[in-house]
Amino acid sequence: MSKKILFLLNRAPYGSSYALEALESVLVAAAFEQRVSLLFKGTGLHQLLTGQDGAAIGQRTVGKVLSALPGYGVERCFACRPSAERLGLAERDFCLPVKWLDYEGQRRLIDDQDIVTG
Amino acid sequence: MATLHLVNKAAAWADCEPLLGPEDTALLIEDGVYAALQALPADIQLHVLAPDVEARGLAERLAPSVRLASFEDFVRLVVGHARVLSWTC
Amino acid sequence: MLTPSTKGPVAPTDKEGYLLDLADWSPEVAERIAQREGIALTDEHWRIIRLLRDFYAAHDLSPTMRPLVRRVYTELGPEAGTSLHLLKLFPGNPAKIAAKIAGLPRPTNCL
């Protein structure tokens, strides 16, 4: 049974294992053919930056893993516009195409889900 | 289709608040209860977990619009909403 | 399964046969691992192995079956890009066995 699952990604890509662990969950959900959406918010938007190289600190590169998601059937990626404006980020900084959402759009996205998780 | 927003750090409240829908409820738990010390919008359904408030010595310091919730209320809130969103930071 | 040959470079692997240090990989090591899996590598195998290594370099990730098939389909065409074709080349579990031979980590979340 396929469910709508939204992953709310609001953690920075390095400095903790949260971002990669959330991505592993995203890959599992996609492998089980769930209808997965991602919402990048706050410093979670930094996961999307181009030019990352985790190898410099002996870690996997979050941006590289993210760029594999379309191949896993994960194509609904949303980004919080107010966070991006606060952080001075634009889509040209990102390794994946995103759809921008204001707060109202994010509320509607959440309302449409069966499950919302971190 | 309402959402229960669980906030367990005061700093996560700023992320959560703009996404509260009119039908939604927020429940502050653990260190999230510190967010209830400031003036909060009166038009939102806001609960704080009473044991966490008592443990931190905040019972007399809460904003007036805040409602106290027991662990049983916590369970009732979870089953009474379509989904639960845990805010982290 | 064939008996491992005593010739050729040997690199330490885990119990399942995945390289412990990915930097130990070489085409010769790939031949050895394939041999342990009972596979004699052909050009057709090598196309998949190269594609897998490119995928890993781009995404820090060993693909599971569905994204692997998808990538093979787009890169190598519709005849190569089917589960059946990959099963013929790497019988059993193509995503896992091909990753092993290509010197990548075990794909996680493999169904």
Image (cartoon, coloured by chain):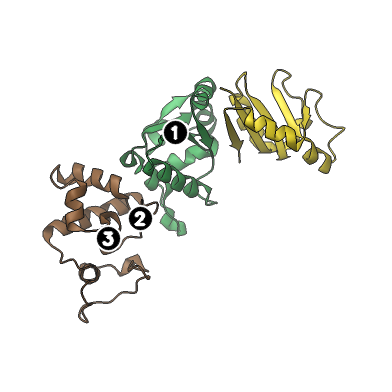
Chain colours: A green, B yellow, C brown
Q: Are marks 1 and 3 in contact (CB under 8 Å)?
A: no
Question: Tag 2, which secondary structure?
Answer: loop
In this figure, which residue is indicated by the disc labeled 3? C97
Residue B63, position in %: x, y? 80, 27
Residue B69, position in %: x, y? 76, 32
Amino acid type indicated by mark 1: Lys
Amino acid type indicated by mark 2: Pro
Amino acid type indicated by mark 3: Ile
Crowding near the residue tagged with mark 2, few <14, some 14–19, many ≥20 C-alpha atoms within 10 Å: some
Residue B78, position in %: x, y? 64, 32
The residue lying at 25 percent from left, 69 percent from top is C33
Image-quadrant location for residue B74 = top right
The residue lying at 44 percent from left, 33 percent from top is A3
Task: Report whether mark 1 lies on the same chain as mark 3.
Answer: no
In this figure, which residue is indicated by the disc labeled 1? A3
Residue A39 versus residue A115: which sits nearer the camera?
A115
In this figure, which residue is indicated by the disc labeled 2? C107
Residue C45 versus residue C4: which sits nearer the camera?
C4
Image-quadrant location for residue B58 = top right
In the rendered view, would you say A45 is above or below C84?
above
